Amino acid sequence: MDLIKAANSEPFRRFRGSSSLQLIVIAALNLVAAAIAFLTSILAAGWFGIGSDLDSYYAALTIPTLLIILLGVDYFGTNFFPVYSRLRKERGIAAANELINSLINSITLVIGVLAGASFVFAGFLHRVLLPGLSPSINDSVTTLFRIIVPIVIFQVPTVFIGYVLQYENKIIQSQISAVINASIALFALLFFWQKLGIQSLALGILAGNAVSMVSLALISEGYSFKPVMNLRDSNCHKVITSSLIMTGSGMIARLTTLVERYFASFFPAGSFASLGFAYKLISVPASMIITPLNTVMYAKMTQADSGNDNKACAHIWQKYIIFAFMVMIPLAMLIVYLSKDIMQLVLQRNKVTPGMSAQVALAFAGYSGVFLFGGIGTMLTRVYYLKNKIIIPAVYSVAGFFMYIALATLFTRLWGFIGLPLAMSVLFVICGLLILHMSKSILAEINTGIFYRNIGIITVFSIASITAAALFTEYLSLHSGIPKICSVLLVSLPLYAILMFTANKSLILEVMPRFGAK
């Protein structure tokens, strides 16, 4: 708890109004949490291999993921934030605290009952959902699942309290809990992997989520637990109604993860682990970049919207979306170009063979579209929640689910295992572009010409800088022993940074102003 107290001290309080400091510190904390999670994954792969053990672990996450989807916890949290913000401003902490307790208690009760039922019938559910698994692997999956499943109960208050901390401008403190969460999982693996095997990782994930939830509750000023469930309150009813619409459609769309794992169960050993490992790795840089941008953007948009300043709301959305594309497009291209080299560097040791790392590299490159539009898509849809116009993303979510089934069926027949991440990437790109196009109708104050001009410049400069770096790398590989990763990064990123700063200096300085600017 000393770390949390330090983050709540006077030096942190002085800079709460600084967007630049918040972005820098949040990004740094995300980097630390991501680095710890990355190290945990690397150690697990090295000790257990990309095979049946890790297959069992990633397969065991299927039902917890499904429960979170069924309850739409993140949808409830996102719809809750604008209502909570207005309520706390107009009627004070007591009324706002009753709202959050009503939502947390009711959702936790429902998800707890579902988790208990799935605990009892876990073996049967895994045979139905993952029919391609062998009986021995299914038993291992069931055992790990029964360790992991309580995390769904911990995640409900974690999501809601996280938004309360955003309102209280304690975003930095909320990110520290993510570092604590990742650290506990790492320690559990380090100290117990020889004795408990892959179960040590499951226990670490469980303990990390529990401690993270408690730490968030302790540092929040606006949340204190009360056993209330006033679901008839107009504000509570508003959150539930909006969330259920998105949960119904979003549940269908996000069942793509379940469909992907269904397909993966029919592929050889290591397929679950390769997909899970690649997706987790590709989420590391995405979360490190998008999470701070998204967190600060949504908090600022909510404040502007609560003051009915539509022009300011649109301006905030536009500049943060452009900045996100500016960072993510070149990195997505680098992921495709360097996937094999990255996996050889981080994975190929101990029990991980060249064949295993090559399989993960294929999945890693295949998920590049998810990397690009996964996080940005979350930022794009914030405006729909804010303006309570949720039908458009709901329609796209339903259509996306059926599109993914068609793409996955076709791509796996053409290219086998690699067809699964490719299908997911194509889906994310198509839906992301459609959501981007429709977002402009919600925020009419957006300057469409400037918006698309910036996106065009970003794309052209990304292609130019990565191509130049690739050509330079191929030349160096013939005349020196410099590793490809080093030469590409040394050339492409500085070149791209210079080009983009020259073309978008005002935008960059606006999103990331001078250190300490208020």
Image (tube, rainbow, N blue to C red):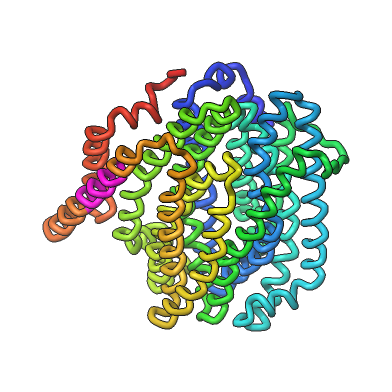
Q: Residue at x 63, y 24 (%)?
A: 8
Q: Is residue 113 above or below residue 301?
A: below
Residue 246 magenta: no
Q: Is residue 175 left or right of residue 234?
A: left
Magenta region's main secondary structure? helix
Q: Is residue 107 left or right of residue 421?
A: right
Q: Is residue 79 above or below residue 503?
A: below
Residue closest to the eye, 92 or 65: 92
Place of residue 27 in the rendered image (x, y in percent of width and height, measured from the top left) = 47, 37
Place of residue 81 in the rendered image (x, y in percent of width and height, measured from the top left) = 65, 37
Quadrant of the rendered structure where residue 500 is?
top left
Residue 459 magenta: yes
**Is residue 172 visible in the rendered structure shown here?**
no
Residue closest to the eye, 153 or 270: 153
Q: Which residues are magenta?
A: 454-466
Q: Is residue 102 above or below residue 109?
A: above
- Quadrant assignment for the N terminus: top right
Q: Residue at x 58, y 37 (%)?
A: 175
Place of residue 36 in the rendered image (x, y in percent of width and height, measured from the top left) = 53, 47
Q: Residue at x 41, y 59 (%)?
A: 429
Place of residue 301 in the rendered image (x, y in percent of width and height, measured from the top left) = 53, 32
**Is residue 465 visible in the rendered structure shown here?**
yes
